[in-house]
Amino acid sequence: MILAGDVGGTKTTLGIFESQRAGILLKEEQTFSSRRYSSFETVLKAFLQDKTVKVDRAAFGVAGPVFSGRCETTNLPWLIDASQVSRQFGIPSVFLLNDLEAAAYGALLLKEEEIKWLQSGEPDPYGNRAIIAAGTGLGESTLYRKGANFRTMASEGGHCDFAPRTSLEIKLLEYLWNRFGHASYERVLSGPGLLNLYAFLKESGDGGEPSRISQRMEKEDPAAVISEIALKGDDPLCIRALDLFVSIYGAEGGNLVLKSMATGGLYIAGGMASKILPKLMDGTFIKAFQDKGRFSALMRRIPVGVILNEKAPLAGAAQFAFLNNDPAF
């Protein structure tokens, strides 16, 4: 049996998969609030305490850079060590991979109805593919073909320097510098990033904040509040913030495609995508995605799809463990 995990700053989902000749089959899963646990091992213990299955392989997609089987998670105070997990839980083979690598492997398993295409393009079946995901942070990864299989290239591209495209975004860059020192794309393209955009526009005089919104933000996830109100068209400032978010998201998605020459397509993953799907579909994302000057014609040929199955990273981690049992992988 395979133990797999999708380990994020907000939630951690663990699952048991059966390894079959044709692939993997999910048998059971459970989701935990990451911040309620002091370590990854305590989450694993809670999940496995009543399980009698024998796990021979495990793979965990983790939100952070992985070095030599270890990861200090970016948005959690956890140190995850594959060797320690192997010893503590008696699992012979344990793998750690970046969460966007897991999402990339999961994208290869998707059915057609689990993708909403923003641009059909002209897919190249042998071309590289790119994955971008805004959530608690911003993740990016690339799939490239190696023989009969695809392999992933890990990335921390979300922490690259934010590059403004307009006079408004130049002011945004200066705002981010003043607040954070370094201005990365993650400071804009994430749940906290959407709140940063909202605060920037509010301070810039783009609109006031009604008490009904500020009161909700004190009790609920501010990014979720902004998105919900914007999609309903109930507040100009929220609408403006989400519009700016999606435009920058499209631009950075295009940057990732160009850097990885992802002629096989761009997949948009992450917890935010399905929640703001109507906005992603209104043309704002694709307009910014295509706006690459002399390479705009190429960008119109790239398929762009939103992953609707939020369990794709979990399945992708399990698929990675499954493939690592194949000497040809």
Image: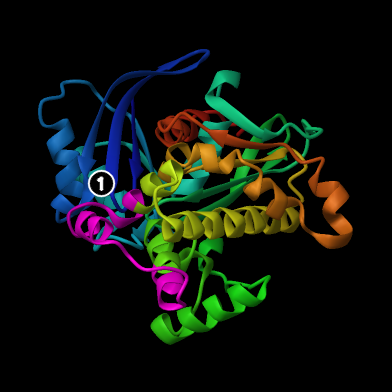
* Residue drawn at 72 percent across, 37 percent down: 303
Magenta: main secondary structure: helix
For disc 1, the marked residue is 85
Q: Badge 1: how crowded within 10 Å, few (<14), some, or many (20+)?
A: some
Up-down relation of residue 6 to residue 110 (above or below): below
In the rendered image, the quadrant that contains the C terminus is top right
Residue 309, placed above or below residue 218: above
Horizontal and vertical percent position of residue 44: 20, 40
Q: Nearer the viewer, residue 286 or 225?
A: 225
Looking at the image, residue 1 lies above or below residue 70:
above
Q: Which residue is rendered at x = 28% and y = 50% of the image?
A: 10
Asked whether residue 269 is drawn in magenta, I would say no
Residue 121 at x, y percent in the picture: 78, 35
The amino acid type found where label 1 is placed reads: Val
Q: For residue 180, what is the image quadrant?
A: bottom left
Q: Is residue 271 left or right of residue 33?
A: right
Label 1 element class: helix
Q: Is residue 113 above or below residue 238?
A: above
- Residue 19 in the image: state x and y as whole percent: 41, 19
Asked if residue 200 is among those painted magenta in the image, a careful observer would answer yes
What is the number of callouts on the image?
1
Q: Which residues are magenta?
A: 199-225
Q: Residue furthest left?
A: 50
Nearest the viewer among 314 and 272 is 272
Q: Nearer the viewer, residue 77 or 165?
A: 165
Q: Residue at x 14, y 56 (%)?
A: 38
Q: Is residue 95 left or right of residue 306?
A: left
Identity of the residue drawn at 34% across and 38% down: 5
Classify the position of the N terminus by image quarter. top left
Regarding residue 269, the answer to whether it shows in the image is yes
Report if residue 1 is visible in the image.
no
